[in-house]
Image (cartoon, grey):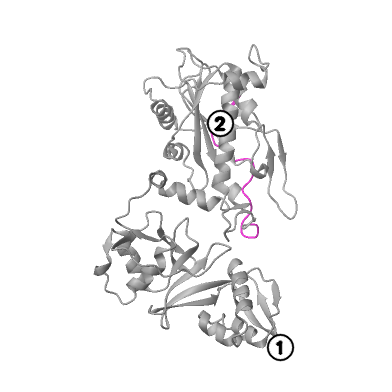
Amino acid sequence: MSHSPIILRWRLGPDFLLAPKAETELALTLADGRTVTLKPSTIGLRDALLALVEGADERHLLALTGGGGGAMLHHYIAKLAAGGIIEASADGGEVPLIRLIPLQIEFSLPRAESLPQRVMLNRFAYLRRSERGAILQHPDAPFDVLIENEACGRLITSLASGSRDIRSLTGALDHALLALLVSPGFVVDADAEEPPMRQSWEFHERVFHRTTRPHNDLLTRGATYRFLDQWPAPPAIRPHYQGQRIALPGPGSLPSSSSAALRDVMENRRSVRAMSAEPVSIEAISQLLHRVARVKEIHPGRHPIPQQTLLRPYPSAGAIHELEFYLAIGCCDQLSPGLYHYNGEEHALTLILNAEKAAAGMVAECAASWGQPDQPPHAVMVITSRLPRLAWKYTAIAYRMSLINAGVVVQSLYLTAADLGLAGCAIGTGNSDLFAQATGVSSWEETSIAEFGFGRPA
């Protein structure tokens, strides 16, 4: 690093304030407005911490301590970095190049690495717009890279377009920047073969996994109610569609409505795709919906969290129950082909207008997914997510929680279908565009995330 044209400086993050409070005390104002008092043991250490406001490299910080406070200085830097309070900037002299935003609690400045002959951007790295500007991210990296100089952006774009021989990089800072990006994995050896286990991970899967699960990092996840003071939580009961309302038969409408022992049902459950020539009955559909998806209770929100919750037969994150249920009917003894929305609080269906073509497409998609395009199910249960209901409460994990909720429902559908003597099988893929076409609802508001085909067994 001593011969590098890049200087690494520690800097206070933009959401924090640091100011003198007493002779050897400092007032640190956090992002949420709270103030914490720091009590450095010497005036020199206090001055070194104050230097973080404008930014300083470690050599200058150590000089400010008077030479004897190195251990305490590194203790403070480690604590402040672990809290995401300070960042590191890589500057070309006095010209800002990139900002290193710590993501891990145990963060340290990257080491300059020797460069391979040919380099390229890691296939898991991506550049996007953030509130602070263009930011380079990688799901396994210990920090994000905020691009503060257009030349750095051009270098990243060049590496993303393909492999580059380092001899072709003639910019004064190119090699120094690359050396900083090799150790955290943003830049890789273009000639190195990717291990098989790593090959099996796709880009979106790795990003989703690392972002939605804790990894000893500084990312905020969980119940933050970040929109509490910005907009009201969407209502628990979805606004009804305009269309014919169809009351479903009562839960005891089947000739044998008693259930087998849970152990027997679980042991006998199978994925069954063979359908009878005789259509599924509306009584069977009613039983399936009543057991799995009905609304049992509606609980009003309470101060200070005015969010309605529900009680349904299956568990849901925070009792929010963002899932909705639709039926794409191919053939049923008392329902015409089309798409129906299930009103769980009324145990009734609403026929969605002008959705017959999309519903037929959903049934055909299911049959194709099963590998039997000429043998479609009688009906497809389309499970959708009103994700803003979850995201109003949960940060970073809302979609993950919705998928978990849908997985619970799919198991309930399997077991209930088996208990009712129905054929049924989940679908590995589903076409969310068909749902949007059928309902006219924006996918930002509600989108299909799981499907389950079923019918009368052969």
Other residues around mark 2 within 10 Å, as few (<14) / some (14–19) / many (≥20): many
Q: Which residue is mark 2?
A: 410
Q: Secondary structure at mark 2?
A: helix
> Residue 257's spot in the image, x, y percent?
66, 16
Measured along the vertical axis of the image, is residue 171 above or below residue 93? above
Residue 113 visible to the viewer: yes
Residue 37 appears in which quarter of the rendering?
bottom right
Looking at the picture, which amino acid does disc 2 mark?
Answer: Val
> Residue 286's spot in the image, x, y percent?
60, 22
- 190 to the left or right of 214: left
Q: Nearer the viewer, residue 313 or 188?
A: 188
Query: Label 1 vs label 2: CA separation?
Result: 64 Å
Other residues around mark 1 within 10 Å, as few (<14) / some (14–19) / many (≥20): few
Q: Secondary structure at mark 1?
A: loop
- Residue drawn at the location 57% of the way across and 64% of the way down: 106
Asked whether disc 1 touches disc 2, contact meaning CB atoms under 8 Å apart, the reply is no
Extreme residue toward the left, this view: 168
Residue 233, magenta (yes or no): yes
- Residue drawn at the location 31% of the way across and 77% of the way down: 172
- Residue drawn at the location 53% of the way across and 62% of the way down: 103
Prevailing secondary structure class for the magenta stretch in the rendered image: loop
Residue 41 appears in which quarter of the rendering?
bottom right
Residue 159, magenta (yes or no): no
Q: Earlier in the sequence, mark 1 or mark 2?
A: 1
- Residue drawn at the location 64% of the way across and 11% of the way down: 255
Which segment did they paint magenta?
A: 228-247
> Residue 25's spot in the image, x, y percent?
70, 82
Looking at the picture, which amino acid does disc 1 mark?
Answer: Glu
Circle nearer the viewer, 1 or 2:
1
Q: Nearer the viewer, residue 36 or 412?
A: 36
Where's the N terminus, which quadrant? bottom left
Q: Which residue is mark 1?
A: 23
